[in-house]
Amino acid sequence: MPKNLTLSNTLTGKKEEFVSLLPKKVGMYNCGPTVYDSAHIGNLRSYVFADVLRRTLELNGYDVTQVINITDIGHLASDSDEGEDKMTKGLKREGKPLTLEAMKELADFYTERFKEDLKDLNIQLPTFLPKASEHIKEDIELLKKLEAKGFIYTTSDGAYFDTSKDPDYGKLGNIHIKTDETESRISLNPEKKNPKDFAVWKKNDKLGYESPWGKGFPGWHIECSAMSMKYLGETFDIHTGGVDHIPVHHNNEIAQSECATGKPYARFWLHNAFVNIEGGKMAKSEGNFLRIQTLKDRNISPLAYRYWLLGARYSSPMNFSWEALEGAQNAFNKLENRILELGNEIGNTNAEYARKFADFANDDLDTPQALALMWELLSDKVISNPDKKATVLKFDEVLGFGLGAIQTTIIPPEIHLLAEEREIARINKDFKKSDELRAEIEKHGYSVKDTPEGQKISNI
């Protein structure tokens, strides 16, 4: 029997055995993108991590209800209550009018781009992908509960949560102990009762939605509380996000949710570390971000990026470099070739390897050890190729590389001859002839790809 699943819970600061609220059912909320631009590859680490977590829960027999929200309104350029709204920033960048209709058009476009990124990375779509703009009613209902209990007050620019009335405010990551850090993170607003108080509704006379607190937009934090509780209930199992969400966004979610309901909000909080580039985290605000398309333009497969990410624990920072990613691409090419060498026959899963793999996955998603075990299996001289393939495909249910789609293709002799002729042309640097032969191969329905191990022929 594999070890029980343990997860590092930011709420307690400990690695704990995971036990769900309901037998074999898990509710999980993953903070989603603000769709004013394409996601960068640093953002996407959060969703690869959430996908591996979901797959590991399913490996343990859980039925997972997963929610990834789409923030298409109400997110300011920073976590504070000042600055430009991100969606407004996107409208200005693309020369669109400042209207709700144009905002929806912008959001719909980048939501589809986000879904394409998920597909490229072989990330399963969540059970629900709710949009903030479609949950204004739920936001207002939640704010009315908070107002009735005396937790919010109004100012000239909106409504704020009074953090002094929540003795547990900042408990996630012990932020409440770090007074200086907490109080300095939000610019002073003379109308706030406390520097830590945060906006739950921001007025905007020209653009927005009607509410008891004036026309405008819900606060970014209230949107996540309203959507998560609508789809998962007032108390649910797991909430994830990047480590940057801990000090502000996630503590604000906890405060407003628990004060409104009087119940615990999420029981397990898990956070992934940054992908760093040139000494700092990758961020659009810093102008140092890369998109999935950037990788494709450099002939790096998105699945090779996924492979690179899984080479470290989700909670460990990673330093991006093209050399590291090219190394991951080479390793992923070798993996694909090894799968091809195993043939198409699928035998029986090796129980001992499957148990070891489950132990690594259940140890707070130890993907580096899981990858090492996969290579150990592929090098095992005792296990038959069909059994190796069955076992690797079992591993892949968690790793998510889509290895089951790799099949040995029977290539006709005439295509092999064309490929050999092309290889000779390449060696002789006759690139014109090489390109002509590639085109001839493609006319017959096959593609040829140059890899460090030689030419790779496959169906188009």
Image (cartoon, rainbow, N blue to C red):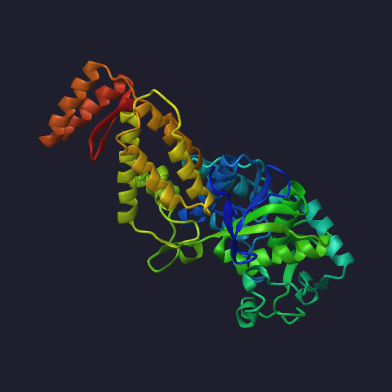
Say if 318 sits above or below 115 in the image: below
Residue at image point 72% right, 64% down: 254
The C terminus - image quarter: top left
Residue 70 image position (x, y, % from top left): 64, 50
The N terminus - image quarter: top right
> Left or right: where does residue 307 sit relative to residue 444?
right
Residue 100 image position (x, y, % from top left): 70, 52
Residue 429 image position (x, y, % from top left): 12, 37
Is residue 205 something that shows in the picture?
no
Q: What residue occupies the far left of the structure in this picture? A: 428
Total count of labels: 0
Residue at image point 63% right, 53% down: 18
> Left or right: where does residue 391 sit relative to residue 451?
right
Q: Nearer the viewer, residue 279 or 104?
A: 279
The quarter holding residue 24 reads top right
Q: What residue occupies the far right of the structure in this picture? A: 148
> Left or right: where does residue 123 sit relative to residue 216?
left
Q: Nearer the viewer, residue 34 or 244?
A: 244
Residue 112 image position (x, y, % from top left): 57, 42
Q: Nearer the viewer, residue 460 or 349?
A: 349
Say if 151 sits above or below 397 in the image: below
Say if 92 sits above or below 426 in the image: below
Residue at image point 70% right, 66% down: 252
Residue at image point 73% right, 50% down: 21
The quarter holding residue 279 reads bottom left
Is residue 166 something that shows in the picture?
yes
